[in-house]
Amino acid sequence: MAALSMTWSCSPLTSSKFRRVNRYPGMAFASVKSTEGLGNLPKVVLTSPHGSEAELYLFGACLTSWKVDSKDLLFVRPDAVFNGQKPISGGIPHCFPQFGPGPIQQHGFGRNMNWSLVSSENVEGNPIVTVELKDGPYSRAMWDYSFHALYKITLDKKTLSTEFTVTNTDNEPFSFTTALHTYFRASVTGASVSGLKGCKTLNKVPDPTNPVEGKEERDVVTFPGFVDCVYLDAPNELQLDNGLGDKISIKNSNWSDAVLWNPHLTMEQSYKDFVCVENAKIGKVQLEPEQSWTAVQHLTVA
């Protein structure tokens, strides 16, 4: 099949459409559209020529939907709010520059700020968008460093890829921890994750502030109740069976750790409908001025 050729032009936050030129009439083509989402928050919709679709809110750079064959593989909690005041609860939120509790607010400020659309492009028929976040008064009030974060999203037929890059634009070194807090749509009683056997574990269930160290002995990890466990030096590919008939490969580079989470009865309204399998960097990333750090995630449904 011949490759697609198209051009897009846009005013990222005000235009409702990108111009698309298809030189092969009758064929589907990739598109990127900037529009308003829930709560009138700016949203970007990516559509691949194969029909898969992803939605990205600029608030928090949160991916809230990834549909393959019209089936959404991500989950947004029913209690999620879209008011620009609180993080969006669900999809793929950012934890930056802090994962979990610590000296600044829970999971940092990356999920609480408006990111800016930098570019859109088409590579081999796949829609790609890049958004950025820079320091400002809100971030400086709790983390007094200058930084530049880029988040690149690529949508293919059955793969959603993200590339997260942080650059130190300050005059001083800084360190951070980070994660992608991915909510997968699932049947919790049937969901399982394989690939973690042999990993060192930090189990937060008994006491979140004092995790219990251990080692994962199971070939297949399930979600029988409340689950909150860090897996250190995890392999670069895990397999999720979401209990709904889908097998999802979770590949990464430079996300050294993994986290499994399900709130069980503490979130009775929705815990049965999702599991979180998160790529994370639990140990601190240290960056000198002008240095950068990049991590990539590929989610692929069989």
Image (tube, helix red, strand yellow):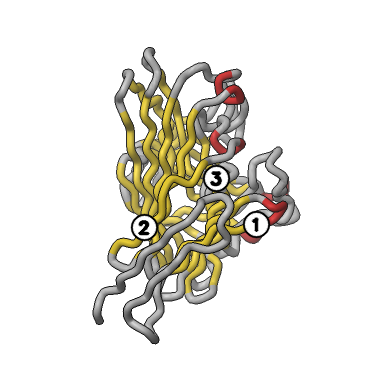
Q: Nearer the viewer, residue 185 or 127?
A: 127
Residue at the image point whose x is 36% and y is 57% from the top: 121
Q: Which mark is residue 37?
A: 1
**Label 1 to label 3: alpha-carbon separation:** 16 Å
Residue 4 picture quarter = bottom left
Decide: few, some or many residues near mark 1? Use Cα within 10 Å; few <14, some 14-19, many ≥20.
some
Q: Position of residue 6 (x, y in %)?
A: 34, 68
Residue occupied by mark 2: 121
The residue wearing badge 3 is 93
Amino acid type of the residue tagged 2 in the rendering: Glu
Q: Residues within 10 Å of mark 3 (few under 14, many from 20)?
A: many
Q: Where residue 299 sits in the image (x, y, percent)?
A: 40, 58
Gap in angstroms between the C-alphas marked 3 and 2: 23 Å
Image quadrant where one finds the C terminus: bottom left
Q: Nearer the viewer, mark 1 or mark 3?
A: 1
Q: Does the image show residue 295?
A: yes
For the N terminus, the image quarter is bottom left
- Does any portion of residue 250 appear in the rendered image? no
Q: Amino acid at mark 1?
A: Gly
Q: Which residue sits at x=52%, y=62%?
A: 33
Which comes sooner in the sequence, label 1 or label 3? 1
Name above or below for residue 150 compared with residue 15.
above
Judging from the image, what secondary structure is the residue with disc 2 in? strand
